[in-house]
């Protein structure tokens, strides 16, 4: 099925026409790749990396959670919206009921899309995020709270192969922790090691470092391994510095090379490992803030 036929299905059967112009849908359809799925075959499976979303172009599929059918997917419906969420892995299985054709939109496709038509790309991302948030609220309820402590895995582009090699060598230890990383790093690690992210964030220049900083401030990070490229300038250098500062504020182990990363892993798997040194600077700051609120300062 060529892009023009993909466009025809989307414009005729999907909800996109209610939110986007024909031109925007045409541009989006150029980034979709068609894939045939045999009857009763999985289109995507629970627990896999959430690295793409799909549109049903022909046929029909069922949505399964732990083997129980919770929904159906018809022509024009999309699924896999967790690609744009913080979720690292699929929460459901999609299985073809008939011989089907799906249109696939991956994180790599989105990266190409945003480079060539950033305004259109961000509009589509916001749309899928909004739909995904609504669906997750329906499944989880508004009071869901993530209390996991993640090990963050980050690397500049020139250091990603080094991070992959490090994770491969220490997968038995790293696999004990829920992991957070960017979607592209997560895909690379899944291909190299089979490890699946528990949560994902945007790339560093698009706010990923800040997102992990937020997790640090909400006590959702046990350690950060950030293989930095020391010989290149980076447009988000201020974000990197801010992340390191937050690690100092909250006393989170922060490694920037394989040697310190090994030390962090050794520390984290030590039974009862925790920092017993009081953070007097943070305590003083919080006490001062309390005085300000009470009007004593």
Image (cartoon, rainbow, N blue to C red):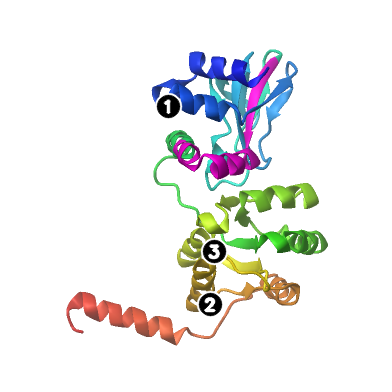
Placement of 188 over or under 290, stated as above or below = above
Placement of 70 over or under 9, stated as above or below = below
Q: Tag 2, which secondary structure?
A: loop
Q: Quadrant of residue 99?
A: top right
Q: Quadrant of residue 7?
A: top right
Residue 110, numbered circle: none
From mark 2 to mark 3, how far is it between C-alphas? 26 Å
Residue 20, numbered circle: 1
**Which quadrant of the rendered structure holds the N terminus?**
top right
Residue depth check, mark 2 versus mark 3: number of the one nearer the observer: 3
Over which residues does the magenta segment extend?
Answer: 100-123
- Residue 105 falls inside the magenta stretch: yes
Placement of 272 over or under 278, stated as above or below = above
Q: Tag 1, which secondary structure?
A: loop
- Residue 21 falls inside the magenta stretch: no
The tag earlier along the polypeptide, 1 or 3, is 1
Residue depth check, mark 1 versus mark 3: number of the one nearer the observer: 3
Q: Is residue 139 visible?
A: no
Which residue occupies the foreground of this view, 30 or 154?
30
Q: Is residue 29 visible?
A: yes
Kindly indicate whether the residue at mark 3 contacts the one at mark 2 (C-beta within 8 angstroms).
no
Task: Tell me residue 14's x, y (percent).
Answer: 49, 19
Residue 235, numbered circle: 3
Task: Tell me residue 252's x, y (percent).
Answer: 56, 73
From mark 1 to mark 2, how far is it between C-alphas? 46 Å
Residue highlighted by disc 2: 251
- Badge 2 density bin: few <14, some 14–19, many ≥20, Cα 10 Å: some
The tag earlier along the polypeptide, 2 or 3, is 3
Q: Is most of the magenta stretch helix, strand or loop?
A: helix
Kindly indicate whether the residue at mark 2 contacts the one at mark 1 (C-beta within 8 angstroms).
no
**Which quadrant of the rendered structure holds the C terminus?**
bottom left
**How many discs mark residues in the rendered view?**
3
């Amino acid at each position: 099925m060529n892009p023009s036929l993909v466009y025809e299905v989307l414009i005729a059967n999907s909800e996109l026409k209610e939110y986007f112009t024909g031109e925007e849908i045409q541009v989006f359809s150029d980034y979709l790749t068609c894939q045939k799925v045999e009857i009763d075959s999985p289109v995507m499976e629970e627990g896999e990396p959430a690295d793409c979303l799909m549109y049903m172009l022909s046929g029909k599929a069922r949505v399964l959670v732990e083997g129980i059918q919770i929904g159906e997917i018809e022509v024009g419906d999309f699924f896999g919206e967790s690609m744009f969420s913080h979720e690292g892995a699929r929460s459901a299985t999609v299985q073809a009921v008939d011989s089907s054709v799906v249109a696939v939109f991956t994180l790599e496709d989105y990266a190409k899309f945003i480079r060539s038509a950033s305004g259109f790309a961000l509009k589509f991302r916001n749309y899928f995020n909004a739909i995904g948030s609504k669906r997750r609220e329906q499944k989880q309820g508004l009071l869901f709270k993530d209390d996991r402590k993640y090990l963050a895995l980050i690397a500049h582009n020139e250091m990603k192969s080094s991070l992959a090699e490090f994770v491969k060598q220490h997968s038995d230890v790293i696999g004990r922790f829920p992991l957070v990383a960017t979607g592209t790093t997560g895909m690379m690690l899944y291909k190299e090691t089979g490890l699946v992210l528990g949560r994902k964030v945007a790339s560093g220049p698009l706010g990923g470092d800040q997102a992990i900083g937020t997790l640090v401030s909400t006590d959702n990070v046990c350690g950060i391994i950030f293989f930095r490229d020391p010989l290149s300038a980076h447009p988000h250098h201020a974000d990197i510095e801010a992340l390191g500062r937050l690690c100092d504020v909250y006393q989170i182990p922060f490694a920037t090379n394989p040697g310190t990363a090994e030390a962090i892993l050794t520390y984290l798997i030590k039974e009862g490992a925790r920092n017993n040194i009081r953070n007097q600077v943070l305590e003083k700051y919080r006490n001062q803030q309390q005085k300000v609120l009470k009007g004593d300062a």
